[in-house]
Image (cartoon, rainbow, N blue to C red):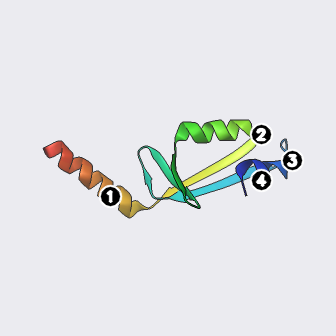
């Protein structure tokens, strides 16, 4: 179900849209895979999408795999030493 489709079934002035995003993320955003399509959902893209759906109350809970964040930090540390 798309974000817009979920919002269409809700009362835009009284209901709360609760969106949980879980992904292998990076500093660029969250990796999103839908079928064969894989893209990065950036914070500005998400903000734009949430603004367009017309819901007054929104809660967004992003979760990212902490192991991947540790690997990303180690890569950054190694690059800084070069």
Quadrant that contains the C terminus? top left
Q: Residue furthest front?
A: 36
**Between discs 3 and 2, the one toward the N terminus:** 3
Give the CA separation, mark 4 to mark 2. Answer: 14 Å
Residue at horizontal 40 percent and vertical 61 percent from the top = 66
Q: Identify the residue position indicated by label 3 in the image.
A: 11
Q: Identify the residue position indicated by label 1 in the image.
A: 70
- Residues at circles 1 and 4 in contact by the CB criterion of under 8 Å: no
Q: Identify the residue position indicated by label 4 in the image.
A: 6
Instruction: Choose mark 4 or mark 2, whichever is in front.
Output: 4
Give the CA separation, mark 4 to mark 3. Answer: 10 Å
**Between discs 4 and 3, the one toward the N terminus:** 4
Say whether residue 59 is left or right of residue 25.
right
**Between discs 3 and 1, the one toward the N terminus:** 3
Q: Identify the residue position indicated by label 2 in the image.
A: 56
Give the CA separation, mark 1 to mark 4. Answer: 34 Å
């Amino acid at each position: 179900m798309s974000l817009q489709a979920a919002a269409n079934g809700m009362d835009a002035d009284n209901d709360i849209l609760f969106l949980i995003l879980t992904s292998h993320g990076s500093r660029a955003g969250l990796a999103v895979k839908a079928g064969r399509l894989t893209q990065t959902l950036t914070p500005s893209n998400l903000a734009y999408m949430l603004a367009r759906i017309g819901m007054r109350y929104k809660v967004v809970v992003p979760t990212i795999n902490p192991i991947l964040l540790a690997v990303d930090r180690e890569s950054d540390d190694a690059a800084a030493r070069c």
